């Protein structure tokens, strides 16, 4: 089979396939370039899910007129100079592929003006292939983009208009999802951008409808409220920690905000949105036993670290990174999340609300959010100008551009020709130097392939004030479970043979006796095996119980024999696969010792108990809680008082080892409202 050199057009479309998967990919690349350009406000508008039109406008540094042709050359970028810069990346883009790849599969129009320039430049791309001759006279296909340009009055910054995406790649266009689905993807992406850079104002409109408008105040909690609603925003806890060059900031949800998937675990590393199994694992480990199985936490976390300790060049869409010291990151995030969670009482607060009332409240909140959005989302002056593009049919693009490129450019994006109104396009939200606040900081260029690599490193965007409006200090709260208040607890009684009612002042505590007993047993075992108590932990069995193990069961037991010994088991090897269980942990007196022992071995053989000895220890201790008193079992008042008293002395009494709450709390005021004593 003969080897062929691919044409530049084919090369361009293949490269575009890696970068531009769908309309959301275009939005991601263009918005990242706007952020790198130091923009303080970014506006995105789409039509038909982004397939018909995508417009991204920013008030960043703009592109020099002479550098615009380079913007459409592949691997031309202002972000890096050589491979050494890849070790110190501080920008979101760096490959110089964005505009070149987008222009290969769509029609692109750009209007840009640098600060200090009297006029801006408008350019529209006309793809053209040529053969670049080398010294030997041999040619290799290359691709440039012929641009029709003209001077124009424009505001500082850059506007990029992308039309008829995949017009020349019908197969790719065929596999786009519905306009609603593609719009949803872009809406989610814009929410991620807003969360990644709270100091930037983002405005997103789809088919003429306002979808998102943020203030750029730097208040991350305000953004969580706008995006996820009042209920979620009221159940998040701040995280702020710094250690050995690592800085962790953001919010994590209380256990009751847990979700059925990891979709609400949001991570940013040095301002870059990404997906990370390592960070997800660290976050979930931080919750310890506070989450139920198959439930996942809500979190918005920013991790900042030296650029040299993270490799971002490992994924085509830059959605994954590789850390130099993964163990250090895992331990840091795990410990700090756990510390932040347990700065608060994690008792779920329940309101006596019916499903209909809850549904009505949610609808009211959604209506309030929509009303607020419409009030705040006044269009920027450039958006209210006459700007409907006249889009030719896909098949006639080439002839239209060749016949009348200048007319096409003029008609496609009109600003009204009012050069004297440039200062009205955007509020100047640029970050300023903390020493000399009268001088705006010049920022990086607008596109990853936008300018020659000529900008000094000291003019890169400043991220110091990213969370200037966010308060990460723990909010003081009145604790319910204290020794002083415990003296005034009054056990009212038991209901349904499962729940104990405890009254204190104007609050009511409902305690699940099974979950409470599980937690007490678990903590007893863990204290013993970690050396925090010297109390005897073994209950002798008379007579001992004999058990015969299969080869796999015996191998599993031998592998974890020390762990069983720490738990309080006394097991004698009788030979030939036979063992005698002579003692079991004190907390398991009501369990069948052989059944529980075999169940534990089954878990080990199923590879569900893996990792460090401490993790295995914790998991076995969790299983050992099967001995806890069951629901619907009547306890004497004295037994209940002892159980509740011991529960309240624990460091973390809020959830059983499986993540279920041991107690919930209700306020008298909520009950008064239910009985219409309060309106």
Image (tube, rainbow, N blue to C red):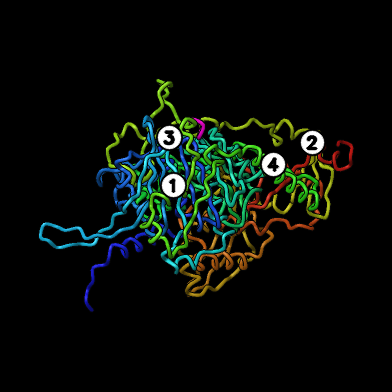
Q: Nearer the viewer, mark 3 or mark 1?
A: 1
Q: Secondary structure at mark 3?
A: loop
Point 59% across, 67% down: residue: 599
Q: Residues within 10 Å of mark 1 (few under 14, many from 20)?
A: some
Pointer 1 and pointer 2: residues touching (CB < 8 Å)? no
Question: Sequence order check: which comes first, mark 3 or mark 4?
Answer: 3
Q: Quadrant of residue 459?
A: top left
Query: Which circle's residue, 3 or 2, is located before the other in the chain?
Result: 3
* Residue at 40% in and 58% down: 400
**Residue 216 higher or lower than 101, as above or below:** above
Mark 3 and mark 2: Cα distance apart in space: 62 Å
Q: Quadrant of residue 221?
A: top right
Q: Kindly identify which residue carries mark 1.
A: 410
Marks 4 and 1 sit apart, C-alpha to C-alpha, by 36 Å
Which tag is nearer the camera, tag 3 or tag 2? 3
| Residue on which disc 4 sits | 371
Q: Which residue is mark 3?
A: 156
The secondary structure type at the circle numbered 4 is: helix
Q: Which mark is residue 504?
A: 2
Give the residue at the far bottom of this rendering: 1
> What's drawn in magenta, residue-wise?
423-428
Is the residue under label 1 in contact with that under label 3 (CB below 8 Å)? no
Is residue 524 in view from this perspective? no
x and y, in percent, of residue 1 in the image: 23, 79
* 176 shown above or below 202: below
Is 305 on the left-hand or right-hand side of 282? left
Residues at discs 4 and 1 in contact (Cβ within 8 Å): no
Instruction: Compare marks 3 and 1 and give the one earlier in the sequence.
Output: 3
CA distance separating discs 3 and 1: 19 Å
Kindly indicate the quadrant of the structure image that contains residue 540.
Answer: bottom right
């Amino acid at each position: 089979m003969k080897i062929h050199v691919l044409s530049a057009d084919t090369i361009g479309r293949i490269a575009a396939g890696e970068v531009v998967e769908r309309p959301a990919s275009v939005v991601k690349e263009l918005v990242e370039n706007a952020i790198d350009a130091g923009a303080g406000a970014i506006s995105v508008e789409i039509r038909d899910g982004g397939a018909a039109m995508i417009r991204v406008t920013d008030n960043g540094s703009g592109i020099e007129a002479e550098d615009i042709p380079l913007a459409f050359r592949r691997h031309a970028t202002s972000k890096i100079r050589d491979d050494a810069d890849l070790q110190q990346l501080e920008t979101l883009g760096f490959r110089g592929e964005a505009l070149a790849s987008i222009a290969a599969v769509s029609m692109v129009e750009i209007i840009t003006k640098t600060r200090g320039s009297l006029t801006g430049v408008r350019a529209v791309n006309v793809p053209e292939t040529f053969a670049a001759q080398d010294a030997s006279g041999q040619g290799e296909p290359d691709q440039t983009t012929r641009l029709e340009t003209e001077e124009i009055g424009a505001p500082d910054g850059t506007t990029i208009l992308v039309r008829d995406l995949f017009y020349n790649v019908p197969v790719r266009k065929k596999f786009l999802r519905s306009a609603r689905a593609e719009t949803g993807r872009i809406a989610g992406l814009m929410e991620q951008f807003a969360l990644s850079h709270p100091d930037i104002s983002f405005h997103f409109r789809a088919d003429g409808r306002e979808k998102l408008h943020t203030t750029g105040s730097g208040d991350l909690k305000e953004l969580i409220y706008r995006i996820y609603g009042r209920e979620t925003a009221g159940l998040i806890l701040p995280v702020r920690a710094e250690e050995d060059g690592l800085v962790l900031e953001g919010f994590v949800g209380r256990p009751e905000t847990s979700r059925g998937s990891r979709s609400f675990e949001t991570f940013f590393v040095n301002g870059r949105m990404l997906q990370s199994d390592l960070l997800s694992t660290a976050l979930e480990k931080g919750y310890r036993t506070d989450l139920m199985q198959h439930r996942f936490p809500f979190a918005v976390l920013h991790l900042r670290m030296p650029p040299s300790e993270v490799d971002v060049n490992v994924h085509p869409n830059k959605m994954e990174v590789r850390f130099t010291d993964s163990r250090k990151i895992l331990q840091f995030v795990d410990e700090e999340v756990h510390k932040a969670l347990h700065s608060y009482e994690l008792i779920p607060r329940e309101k006596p609300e019916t499903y209909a009332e809850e549904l009505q409240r949610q609808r009211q909140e959604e209506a309030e959010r929509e009303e607020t959005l419409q009030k705040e989302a006044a269009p920027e002056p450039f958006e209210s100008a006459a700007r409907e593009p006249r889009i030719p049919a896909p098949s006639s693009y080439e002839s239209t551009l060749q016949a009348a490129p200048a007319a096409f450019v003029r008609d496609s994006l009109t600003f009204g020709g009012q050069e004297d109104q440039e200062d009205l396009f955007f509020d100047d939200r640029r970050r300023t130097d903390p020493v000399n606040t009268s001088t705006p900081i010049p920022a990086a260029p607008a596109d990853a392939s936008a300018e020659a690599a000529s900008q000094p490193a000291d003019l890169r965007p400043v991220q110091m004030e990213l969370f200037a409006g966010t308060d990460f200090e723990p909010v003081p709260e009145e604790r319910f479970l204290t020794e002083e208040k415990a003296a005034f607890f009054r056990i009212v009684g038991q209901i349904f043979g499962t729940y104990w009612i405890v009254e204190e002042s104007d609050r009511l505590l409902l305690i699940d006796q099974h979950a409470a007993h599980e937690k007490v047993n678990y903590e007893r075992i863990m204290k013993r095996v970690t050396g925090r108590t010297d109390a005897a932990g073994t209950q002798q069995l008379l007579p001992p119980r004999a058990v015969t193990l299969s080869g796999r069961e015996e191998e599993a037991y031998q592998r974890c024999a020390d762990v069983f010994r720490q738990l309080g088991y006394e097991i004698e090897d009788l030979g030939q696969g036979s063992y005698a269980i002579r003692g079991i942990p004190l907390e398991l007196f009501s369990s069948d010792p052989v059944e529980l022992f075999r169940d534990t071995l089954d878990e080990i053989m199923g590879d569900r108990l893996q990792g460090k000895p401490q993790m295995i220890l914790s998991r076995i201790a969790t299983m050992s809680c099967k001995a806890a008193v069951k629901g619907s079992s009547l306890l004497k008042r004295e037994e209940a008082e002892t159980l509740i008293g011991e529960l309240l002395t624990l460091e973390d009494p809020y959830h059983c080892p499986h993540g279920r709450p041991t107690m919930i709390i209700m306020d008298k005021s909520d009950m008064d409202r239910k009985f219409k004593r309060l309106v």
